[in-house]
Image (cartoon, helix red, strand yellow):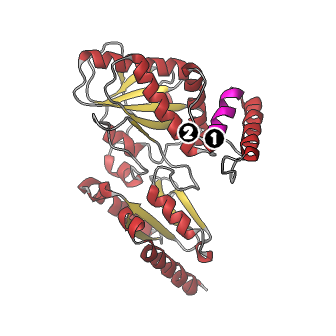
Amino acid sequence: MPSWADLPIGQVVRLDADPDAIAPALDPLPDDAPAVVTYFAAEERSVVGLAASVLRELDKAAIALFPAWLPGAEGIEGPSGVNVAAVQALALRRASATGHFGPFLAELARRALTGGPSGLAPEVRAAGLVRALADSFGRARLAVLVRVPDGLGAAAGEVLVAGCEWLAHRGRAGVWLAGAPLHDDRVRTIATPLPASPLPAAAGGARGAVPLPATADRAPAVAYPPVAGRPHPGSASERALEAALSARAWAGGRAWNQTYRTGPLAVPIRVDLLWERERCVVEIDGPDHRAPAKFAADRQRDVLLQLDGYAVLRFPDAQVMTDMDTVVRQIGQFLRNRRRAEG
C-alpha cells in the first residue's frame, strides 16, 4: 500500500478511488501527505480558460487563508497604507529567507488587504499560489484533487487534462484526478492510500466548508481544509460563532479546528471547536451531516470522544446563523457547570 508521500508531485495522475472516499482520508491530513485542495472542475472550452479558472479559485483560497502563509501578519487588517506597507515588508523578508518569489508574495499580501486582481503572469501566479497554499498548512508540497464532472465529452476531457498538465508543470503541484472517467491515455491510474476500512476514516470526519460541484450556473470552486487555531474562512457559521464568543470572557481557552487522538494508535479526529481543560467539543453541522453515512460517522466520533471524557455539543449551522444567543448561552452554561464541578 503506498503512502500519500508516494503520490507524484509535478504530474497529473488518476486515483483509483471515489473522491467521496478520498475526502475523509485526508481530513485531518495524514502526517506524510502534502497539503490538498479540491477543485470542482467544470467544462471549459480552452486550456487558457481552464488555467484561468483554476488560478482564480486558488487565488481566492490564498486570500481567504491570509495570514496563514505570512507569519507575523496576524492581527494586521484593513487596507490602510501603513498596513499594506507592513505586510509587503513581511512578505519580502519571508521571500528572501525561504525562496518565495518576492514580488508575487508582496502583491498577494497587498491584495489580501485591499482586494483587486493580480497583475502578474499566469506562470508566476501558478508557482506562487501553490507555495503559499502549501505554507498555509505547514506543508512543503501541494496537491490539487480535481473532481471530474460527469458528462464531459472527448474534447472537454482533453482540455481538462491539458490544463491540469499546465498546472502540474508550471506550479509544481501534484494534480490528482478523481470522479467521472476520462478517456485519455496520457493519464496513468495509481493506487490510492486509503485505509482498509472506510469506517475509521469516516470517524475522522470529512469536514470543512466543501462547496458543491460546479454546474452550468455555478462557477467552479475550490475546497480546502481549515488551518488549526482559526475558524474555517469558508464557514460563515464558524466565523459568526467566533465573533460572538470573542466578546465573552468565559469563552477563553477555546481552540478552533484541532486534531485530537484518543490514543497513540487511534485514528485522528478533527473537531470544530475545543475547550481542552473543560473537555468540551462543539461541532457545527451543515445539511450534509443528515446523510446516513455522515450521521453514522458523527455518532462514532461522538462515542470515541465521550469514552475519553469529552462532552460533544452539536449545533446545526442554520441555528448558529439564526439563533446565536441560544447557542452561546448553552455553550456558556455547560462550561460554567464543568468549571464549578472541577473547582
Q: As drawn, is 78 to the left or to the right of 149?
A: right
Q: Nearer the viewer, mark 2 or mark 1?
A: 2
Q: Residue 29 appears at what percent x and percent y?
A: 49, 44
Q: Which mark is residue 206?
A: none
Magenta span of residues: 102-111
Asked if 196 appears above or below 117 in the picture, the reply is: below
Q: Residue 6 appears at what percent x and percent y?
A: 48, 28
Q: Residue at x 47, y 53 (%)?
A: 268
- On the question of residue 117 being in view, the answer is yes
User: Is tag 2's residue or tag 1's residue first in the polypeptide sequence?
Assistant: 2
Main SS category, magenta section? helix
> Splitting the image into 4 quarters, where does residue 48 fall?
top left
Q: Which mark is residue 62?
A: 2
- Estimate how packed mark 1 is, as few (under 14), some (14 to 19) or many (20 or more) residues with alpha carbons within 10 Å: many
Local SS, label 1: loop
Q: As drawn, is 78 to the left or to the right of 171?
A: right
Local SS, label 2: helix
Q: Residue at x 35, y 60 (%)?
A: 298
Q: In which quadrant is the C terminus drawn?
A: bottom right
Q: Residue at x 25, y 16 (%)?
A: 154
- Estimate how packed mark 2 is, as few (under 14), some (14 to 19) or many (20 or more) residues with alpha carbons within 10 Å: many
Label 1 is placed on what type of residue? Trp
Q: Residue 73 appears at what percent x and percent y?
A: 70, 47
Asked if 107 appears above or below 316 in the picture, the reply is: above
Label 2 is placed on what type of residue? Ala
Q: Which mark is residue 69?
A: 1
